[in-house]
Image (cartoon, rainbow, N blue to C red):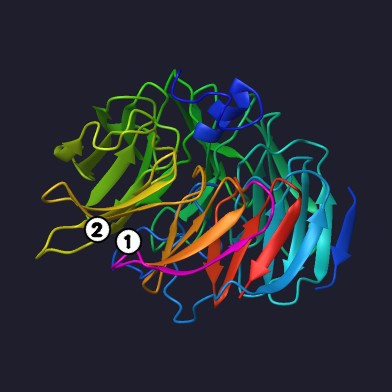
Amino acid sequence: MSFLTQKHFPFSLMSLLLLLASSLSIEPQAVARKKEAPPSLGQVYQFRSAYVDDDKQKPKGTLAWQVKLLGKVQSAAAIDNRSVYVATSTGSVFAFHKQKGVLQWQQALADPIDHASPALSDKHVIVASTSGKVYALNRGNGKKLWTFDAQSKMVATPFVAQLNKQDKAETVYVATRAGKIYALDAESGEQKWAYDTDNMLDASPVVFDGKLFIADYRGRCYAIDIETGKPLWFYTIDGPVVVPPVVVEDTVYFTTTNGALAALDIDTGEKRWRHMGLYSHPLIVPPIIMKDEKQGDRIYIADLEGTLSCVNAKSQTNLWQRQLSGVVVSAPVLSNGVLYVAMGDGQIWALNALTGVELWKTRVASMIESGLLVNHGYLYVGANSGRFYALK
């Protein structure tokens, strides 16, 4: 694993691989694609995930509010129509009023959370911890409702989905570093099924069209039936996969730390196309795909060294490219024609998605590992300093 070195970040190699992968003080202060597999309300795939929001309001980079928390904010927040939910590395979970930043509740789990973002079911905030525990908290008051022991460290974000339109019951899907995938009843926490990939899972699962998509550290990509837990197909791509796949219409996209990008048929796993080494640096964030049947799909992707590219999938040529100010370990977000990118040096850029022209940028003065979240004209992001920001 020589693709990351100490020059990138001032911490251990294990922490870097995970990237590839309670006290409170408050201070005053995407064009959505049809049939895309969107997060459910508030759901984000993972801290490196590209959250797509079709709201017409555009954040301008002005600070709306911020809070200072104990520990690092290394995972993306989750959001609903009232609150934004934030988890810290010390194992505390907070709910804030999403526009005012007022604390609504906090729950100290005393169980470290390493990059896994909170996920939302209809009633619960679902949190995966490093001890292997999955917690369900009441969305209204933060009270612990159930706990499941997966018996292995988790850095992947849980995914919540209904089995089908007729069955309103929700299922929580979690992946562990020991290689197991669990399906849990969202109401009770009881296990429905488990599947063992026999290899490390850092990437979060994504559920779409009755299938769970995930890939392991050896580059094996899976489609699994969400009701039975039985594998439907496999595909092996070159290099470890450490981020969730992206599903658009009938295609699922996987990226690797070796710079490979593959587009597969969601029903059969058949390769539609695969780019090997198209990107010269590791890809540790998922791509954003914009469908264009006439000119060829447009792929937005950032590599570890901060090169942001817009690539035509059909011709495999760059439409535009920008060299940003630092490393990128947090996925760009596309919302209403604007790309938002957070940098390792604490800068946040907003770019015109068609041209790559800079619209604005700002700095939060701390390393950003957490994913961005765009909602109703606000951009939410956490930093390693423990600060959580809402920009508008």
Which SS class for mark 2? loop
Q: Which mark is residue 382?
A: none
Q: Residue 288: x percent and y percent? A: 34, 55
Question: Can you see residue 389?
Answer: yes
User: Which quadrant is home to the N terminus?
Assistant: top left
The amino acid beneath tag 1 is Glu
Q: Nearer the viewer, residue 197 or 332?
A: 332
Which secondary structure dominates the residues rendered in magenta? loop
> How far from the left and from the top, in percent, is residue 361?
54, 65
Q: Which residues are magenta?
A: 353-367
Label located before the other in sequence (2 or 1): 1
Tell me the residue that label 1 is attached to. 36
User: Residue 232 versus residue 292: which sits nearer the camera?
Assistant: 292
Bin the neighbour count of mark 2 within 10 Å (Cα to Cα): few under 14, some 14-19, many 20 and up. some
62 relative to 234 in the view: left or right: right
Depth check: 181 or 65 in front?
65
Q: Nearer the viewer, residue 367 or 136?
A: 367
Residue 376 picture location, percent across and down: 55, 77
Residue 21 seen from this side: no
- Label 1 residue SS: loop
Q: Are marks 2 and 1 in contact (CB under 8 Å)?
A: yes
Q: Is residue 357 magenta?
A: yes
Q: Quick check: is 156 in the magenta stretch?
A: no
167 w.r.t. 315: above or below:
below
Residue at 32% over, 39% down: 254
Q: Position of residue 79 (x, y in %)?
A: 61, 65
Q: Give the residue number, with chain letter if any, for mark 2.
A: 249
